[in-house]
Every structure is written in C-alpha cells, then in structure tokens.
Image (cartoon, rainbow, N blue to C red):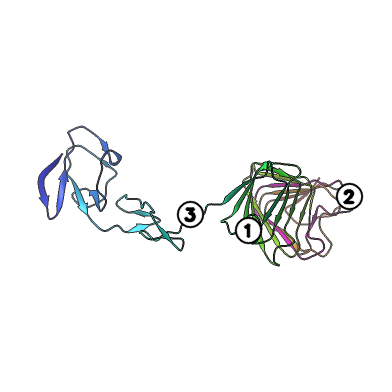
Amino acid sequence: DFSDYKEEEDISLYVEDGELVTLSDVVVEDGYYITDENHNSVDAFESEKIYLITKHAHSFENGKCSCGYECPHESYVNGICEICGTAEPVVPLTIDITDKNYIDIGEGHNYYDKDGYIITGRNTEAYIEVCESADLTFRDTEFKQFVVQYAPDDSVMNITLEGTNEINGYIVLGLQHLVFDGSDDATLELPYLSSGGRKGTVTVNGGKINAAAETTSDIPTIDCSGGFTLNGGEVTVSNNNYYVADAPVTLNGGVLNIISTSQDCEAINCKIT
C-alpha cells in the first residue's frame, strides 16, 4: 500500500515488517523507478525501510536504464531502436540442407541480403556455393562441396564451427579469404582446401579442423597460395605436401599437426607425428 508520506514529488512505499519482496513482484508504471531514501536504485525491499517511487527520464545503456527498466524495442528505424538507440539484433537465416541439393548464397541467388547464414542438416549430395562476403555457421552439418571462388575478389567468409561437421568433397576458393573459428569441441572433417593456385588465404582462430586427404594424393591438403595462418584451435593435415611451396605459413598460436614423415617443420607450434 502507498502511504501519505511525501517528499517533493516522491511517494513512499512500505513493506510489512520481516517480509522480503523482490522488484519483480511490484508493478511500477513506466517513467517511474524505485529508490531508497537517498535516491539510490534498489534490487529488493527490506523490512523497516522507506522506499520512494520516483519519476524520471530513462537514460539507456545497452537497452537498459540504471533504474532497471529495459527498453521494449517497439520500433526500429534504419536498424536503430527509436526509444533507446541500440542496434537491431542480428538474426541469421537458418538453412536446413537435409532436402536441398543446391544452396546458392549471394545477391540474385536463392539466399541473399541476410545477417549471416546457419547451415544445418546432413545431405551428402548438397552443394553449397557462396557468391558474396558472408558470415556463416556450420552447425552439425554434412554436405558434399563448398565453393566460394565465384565471390568477388577479397571477399571474406567468416565460418563459425558448432558441433560436428563434415565436408565430403572440396572447399574451393579463388582470391577470397576463409576465416574459421569455433570452440574447442567444434570440429570440421574434410579432405582438403584448395585455392586453385590463386592467392586465397585461410585463417584458423579456433575449433578443430582435420584435413585428412590420403597421403598418396598429389593434391595438398591445404593448398592456399595466399597463405595459411593459425591463431588458435587445432589443425591436422595428413598429406606429404600440406601447402604450396611459395605460400607463407604463419603460426601465432594453436597446434598444427602434420601427419607425415617427410614434411619438415621448424615452427615452434608445429607438431609432426
């Protein structure tokens, strides 16, 4: 119940002695907030104290006011909330490839102009082609081939690994850049990466990637003429020639396992088995 106690325009709220009430149990009209007598916002009511219902203008940071009020984000204009000024959340498009054999991503194709794409489902006949810079997530998926060579030169494909993933055929890039990331238990199995002799690059920041081409194959397991960079995670290659001879290999962190008896490796983070 509200009392007749008044201080300026504030109204006190009394709680029965010995009872603890959380703010979620009290409905406060928008534009007001609850403080103690010193106008400090409170998280819960304690007995034998005076609390004030104070009118104020919300001041938002990351969609929340210091009084505890959270913006409802009722309307966005050009991707910005009209009330609190925060950016509209990014919602990637989920593509289940279970019954799709061809998935093309890019302007003028089946899927385009989205805030990222989540590839999920398993289909060993599925062929995925990306024709633009894109943020992709491989989530417990399996498909035949992944091609980005028709994307504009210097396009960046940020690929986040989640769960267990497998590509049965190629990853083919041209002058594009692949950047892999993921948690320690996120995996990707594939035969090899190839830039077709062009200056594409591969960077691994996290996750576990196993490029397990047959050691007798003439095709390198990682054939990225523009360079290969390992910043984190773990990459295992099992071919006698894991990158083309003139490609720079930069090892800043993580582990590179080379399953080969003929491959020399002097970098400190390499491990040859």
Mark pair 2, 1: CA separation: 31 Å
Cα distance in 3D space between marks 3 and 2: 46 Å
**Callout 1, which amino acid?**
Ala
Amino acid at dot 2: Ser
Residue 125 is situated, as x and y percent measured from the top left of the image, at 76, 44
Q: Position of residue 93 (x, y in %)?
A: 58, 50
In the rendered image, residue 70, in percent from the top left (x then y), is placed at 35, 50
Which residue lies under the disc numbered 2?
217
Task: Specify few, some or many for label 1: CA neighbours under 10 Å numbering under 14, 14-19, or 20 or more.
Answer: many
**In what element is the residue under mark 1?**
strand
Sequence order check: which comes first, mark 3 or mark 2?
A: 3
Q: How far apart are marks 3 and 1 (CA)?
A: 17 Å
The residue wearing badge 3 is: 89
Q: Residue at x 46, y 63 (%)?
A: 78
The quadrant the N terminus occupies is: top left
Q: Does the magenta stretch include residue 213?
A: yes
Identify the residue at horizontal 75%, vertical 42% (top origin).
Answer: 124
Find the residue positioned furthest to the top: 18
Residue 178, given in percent of the width and then of the height, sits at: 69, 58
Q: Is mark 2 on a helix, strand or loop?
A: loop
Q: Is the magenta stretch mostly helix, strand or loop?
A: loop
Is tag 3's residue or tag 1's residue first in the polypeptide sequence? 3
Would you call the spot at circle 2 few (<14 residues within 10 Å), some (14-19), or many (20 or more)? Answer: few
Q: Mark 1 points at which residue?
A: 134
Q: Residues within 10 Å of mark 3 (few under 14, many from 20)?
A: few
Q: Which residue range is magenta in the image?
A: 195-224
The residue depicted at 69 percent of the width and 60 percent of the height is 131
Are the residues at dot 3 and dot 1 in contact (C-beta closer than 8 Å)? no
